[in-house]
Image (cartoon, grey):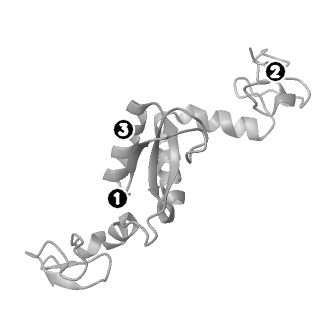
Amino acid sequence: MDDVKVCPRCDAEYYAHVNKCATCGVELVAPGNLKQAKQALPDAAGELVCVVDGPRDRVLELSATLKKAGFAAQHLKVPDADGGCSTDKGYGVFVPKTQAQAAVKKVEGMWHELHPEMVEAQDRMNAGLCPACGTALRPDNPECPDCGLFLGDPSCQNDPDCGSCD
């Protein structure tokens, strides 16, 4: 199998010394890398969606990591709050729409590898427990009754302009 390469767009087979598809102009890959290479191809419409936003340095790092994982990731400046990402941090990692779900899962997986304690904390919060001490939380109280951890005002629904978390 090492003596052939395949086009990820049209599945044409070539001798191993050939690097680009004569029909598509796409870089050829080994058959074992075909699935990943197909996912990295931009979709026909070329529509990009933002999968994560943040400061420029963080976006550059995530974009490079996603590219190494086979995603067609790009880092772009987000023009305004309606530019495709959920917040206005300035920069975003964009991928073809067809890769968005897989890219988000990859970023979440990287986050969980870097911060495994956050997985446990999120699981506790989802179960109605304090992420710090595990005590049962009351939905009407923004503070843990045992350790006093402030969890935010439930009435603001994560609205940064409500002023309750200042």
Check the image and report above or below for 57 versus 63.
above
Q: Which one is nearer the viewer's eye here, 69 or 85?
A: 85
Q: CA distance from mark 3 to mark 1?
A: 15 Å
Q: Are marks 3 and 2 in contact (CB under 8 Å)?
A: no
Q: Type of residue at label 2?
A: Cys
Q: Type of residue at label 3?
A: Glu
Q: Which residue is mark 3?
A: 61
Q: Circle 2 sits in a helix, a strand or a loop, which is it?
A: loop
Q: CA distance from mark 1 to mark 2?
A: 43 Å
Q: Circle 3 sits in a helix, a strand or a loop, which is it?
A: helix
Is residue 123 visible in the rendered image? The answer is yes
Q: CA distance from mark 3 to mark 2?
A: 36 Å
Check the image and report above or below for 99 versus 54.
below
Q: Which residue is mark 2?
A: 144
Bin the neighbour count of mark 2 within 10 Å (Cα to Cα): few under 14, some 14-19, many 20 and up: many
The x and y percentages for residue 151 are: 76, 24
Q: Is residue 162 left or right of residue 85?
A: right
| Residue ranking furthest to the right | 140
Q: Is residue 67 left or right of residue 44?
A: left
Is residue 136 visible in the rendered image? The answer is no
Q: Which residue is mark 1?
A: 70
Bin the neighbour count of mark 1 within 10 Å (Cα to Cα): few under 14, some 14-19, many 20 and up: some
